[in-house]
Amino acid sequence: MYIPPGFGTVTPYCFVDDAEAFIAFLIDGLGGAETCRSMRPDGRVANVQVAIGTSTLMVSEASVAYPAMRGSYYLYVSDADATMARALAHGAVLEMPVRDMPYGDRQGGVRDRHGNPWWLSERRVHAPYSA
């Protein structure tokens, strides 16, 4: 099985209203980079791929066939406090302040303007999660 670089076995595909605003949040608010873009004949986003760290998210403008739907994302970052500040500065709403968690992460949560929760997690231990 071949998986293209930047993709995992499972890749989130986000159908949202106002795709351009969502893409801007992924780039400006979470530090992503647009890697590919295709547009519909009506000028709306058919597919934009945004790389964040080692992952890629695919984004499309919602339609009748694929209405807007929310997701929830757990994003590993190198600095949870800085990422939280950046996300809030770009329109996210605080869900949970950043704090040290008992499972070894420093983590906080935001909700983007499209209603998606993002758990911003900085792994503080070099060990797997344990039960």
Image (spheres, rainbow, N blue to C red):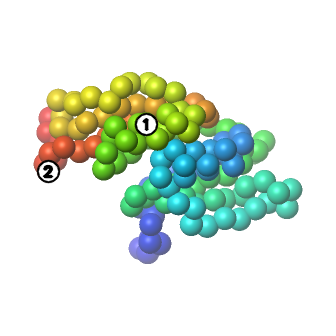
Identity of the amino acid at label 2? His
Whether residue 115 is situated above or below residue 82 in the rendered picture? above
Identity of the amino acid at label 1? Ala
Question: Residue 113 placed where, x, y %?
Answer: 60, 33
Whether residue 9 can be seen here:
no
Question: Residue 65 placed where, x, y %?
Answer: 75, 45
| Residue identified by numbered label 2 | 126
In the rendering, which numbered label is found on residue 120?
none
* C-alpha separation, residue under disc 2 versus residue under disc 1: 25 Å
Q: Which corner quadrant of the image does residue 112 belong to?
A: top right
Q: How busy is the neighbourhood of tag 2: few (under 14 within 10 Å), some, or many (20 plus)?
A: few
Question: Residue 14 placed where, x, y %?
Answer: 59, 47
* Viewport quadrant of the N terminus: bottom left
Q: Give the residue at x 25% y 36%.
A: 106
| Residue identified by numbered label 1 | 85
In terms of depth relative to the viewer, which is nearer, 119 or 58?
119
20 on left or right of 98: right
33 on left or right of 55: right
Q: Give the residue at x 78% y 54%.
A: 44
Whether residue 46 is situated above or below residue 76 in the rendered picture? below
Q: Secondary structure at mark 2?
A: loop
In terms of depth relative to the viewer, which is nearer, 46 or 3?
46
Whether residue 21 can be seen here:
yes
105 on left or right of 58: left
Q: Give the residue at x 53% y 60%.
A: 33
Whether residue 82 is situated above or below residue 34 in the rendered picture? above
29 on left or right of 119: right
Question: Residue 11 placed where, x, y %?
Answer: 48, 55
Q: How busy is the neighbourhood of tag 1: few (under 14 within 10 Å), some, or many (20 plus)?
A: some
Q: Please tell me whether mark 2 or mark 1 is closer to you in this view.
A: 1
N-term-proximal mark, 2 vs 1: 1
Q: Secondary structure at mark 1?
A: helix
